Image (cartoon, coloured by chain):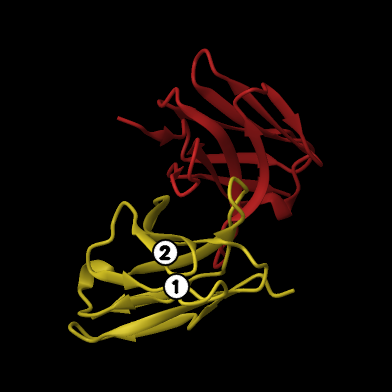
Chain colours: A yellow, B red
Amino acid sequence: NAGVTQTPKFRILKIGQSMTLQCTQDMNHNYMYWYRQDPGMGLKLIYYSVGAGITDKGEVPNGYNVSRSTTEDFPLRLELAAPSQTSVYFCASSYEGQPQHFGDGTRLSIL
Amino acid sequence: GESVGLHLPTLSVQEGDNSIINCAYSNSASDYFIWYKQESGKGPQFIIDIRSNMDKRQGQRVTVLLNKTVKHLSLQIAATQPGDSAVYFCAEFRGGSNYKLTFGKGTLLTVNP
């Protein structure tokens, strides 16, 4: 049982490049989430999904896009990378009303 | 506005002592609280949760206390071990859809041998 798996673990991008952060879970959770964590701070919600085909914005969605074509996968897309998007990104999943389970994060630097 | 905050950013204890990590919240509508542990280079790990209709819940070596009168919750770790060294976050939910998980900034717990 792998839980929540995020790839890649590390990535360096140039300003203006695009990339997709991958997230997959094998717990059959209907809810999935993307957070970013800046140094010394808590986590801020970027986007979330309550099931396949349904996504919605969180607290800090600007500059990001998501899709949820399957229950297992919830990729996060950066179209035009900016230095302000340098952060650690965490994906999480849960059943409704239950604690969220987190992956180990993707550390992204934009130079 | 809503907020989940922590009283102390760092806490240093001796191995074997008990640790208490505090958290204040401002939203009376919050009905579910979670404590997470985050080790360096890892994602947050669920420790224990408590619902607003409870004032205490115990787990293995951990106890969470909820005081709704003063909007405060605490995490008590008994017989703290070096492996407990990590950042601890409290987070709150409000009822209905559970997307609204608000995190505090975290407390860094350091356990000295």
Tell me what residue is drawn at x 52 percent, y 23 percent: B72
Q: Nearer the viewer, residue B71 or A50?
A: A50
Chain hosting mark 2 = A
Q: Which mark is residue A26?
A: none
B78 to A35, vertically: above or below: above
Q: Is residue A37 in view?
A: no
Chain hosting mark 1 = A
Tell me what residue is drawn at x 42 percent, y 64 percent: A54
Type of amino acid under label 1: Arg
Where in the figure is residue A29, as x and y percent of width and height? 61, 63
Provide the residue designation for mark 2. Answer: A54
Tell me what residue is drawn at x 65 percent, y 67 percent: A28
**SS for tag 1?**
loop
Q: Which mark is residue A68?
A: 1
Mark 1 and mark 2, same subunit?
Answer: yes
A20 to B21, vertically: above or below: below
Q: Is residue A24 in view?
A: yes
Q: Is residue A7 left or right of residue B57?
A: left
Where in the figure is residue A61, as x and y percent of width and height? 28, 61
Where in the figure is residue B53, as x and y percent of width and height? 64, 22
Do labels 1 and 2 touch, CB within 8 Å? yes
